[in-house]
Amino acid sequence: MTGLRRPLRLAIVAVTALALAGCAGAASSGTPSPPSLGAVTPVPPEGEVTAVGTVLDTGGVAELCLGPVAESYPPQCSGIPLEDWTWEGVEGAESSGDVTWGAYALQGTFDGESFTVTQPPVMLALYDPMAPEDPTGGEPGAGDEQTLARIQEELPDRLGSSYLSSYPQDGRLWVDVVWDDGTWQDAADREFGEDVVLIRSALRESGG
C-alpha cells in the first residue's frame, strides 16, 4: 500500500500545480486595463479649427499662445508654432524691439504640432463667438478637494506641452489643453470617474 500511495501523492501534486498555472495564465491574459490619461494621444482634427490666443513673433518666428501670457513688456508665453503667418494688413499689433504681438481669433489646420493659418485673423476685440454649452448642467462635480489637488499636480507631466492650465471649481478639475477630440476626456472618466475632470480643448472645430 505504501508503494501505491507515493505515486498517487505525486500525481495529485502535479495536477494541482497545473491547475494553479492555468489560473495564473488566465489572469495574465485577461483584459488589459484601459489606458490612463496622458498614455493616449488625441487624433489631430481632420478639418479646420478655430483658435483664440496671442500671436507672439520674435525675430520673425511666430507662435500661437493658447495658455497664460506673462504680463511683461514685451509679453512672454510658450505656444505652438504658427505657419503661414504674416503681419501684412493685420491690425491690433504692438511691437517692442524684435518682438511683435497681438490677440486674435485664427482659423486654420492643426497637425498635432503646428497651426497653419488659412484665413485672415480677426482681432480679439472684434471677435464674438457663441458661448459654449455648460457641460455641468449647473450641478456640482464628484471630486473632493484632496483628489483634485493630486490630479492637478500630476497633469503637467502627464500631458506635456499640450497642457495649458487647470483649476478646481465646484467638485471638478477644469483642464485646458491645446486639442482634444474626446480621447483624453474618455481616459479621464475611466481613470478618475465621471464628473471629476473636465477637459477643454482650446482648438475647436470650425463651425462647431
Image (cartoon, rainbow, N blue to C red):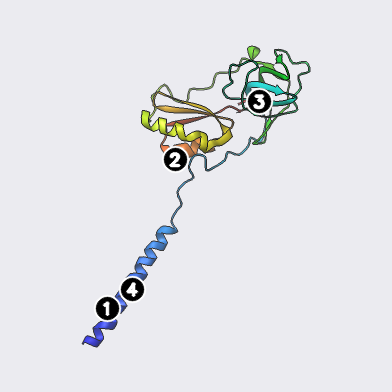
Give the residue number, with chain letter if any, for mark 3. 64
Q: CA distance from mark 4 to mark 1?
A: 10 Å
**Decide: marks 4, 1 in contact (CB < 8 A)?**
no
Residue 190 — which label? 2
Which residue is pictured at 45% across the width and 59% down the height? 29
Residue 206 visible in the snapshot: no
Give the residue number, with chain letter if any, for mark 4. 15
**Label located before the other in sequence (1 or 3):** 1
Q: CA distance from mark 4 to mark 2?
A: 39 Å
- Give neighbour class at mark 1: few <14, some 14-19, many 20+ (Cα, 10 Å): few
Q: Quadrant where the N terminus lies?
A: bottom left
- Give neighbour class at mark 3: few <14, some 14-19, many 20+ (Cα, 10 Å): many
Give the residue number, with chain letter if any, for mark 1. 9
- In the image shown, does 147 or 174 lie closer to the viewer? 147
Give coordinates of residue 147: x percent, y percent: 38, 33
**SS at mark 3?**
strand
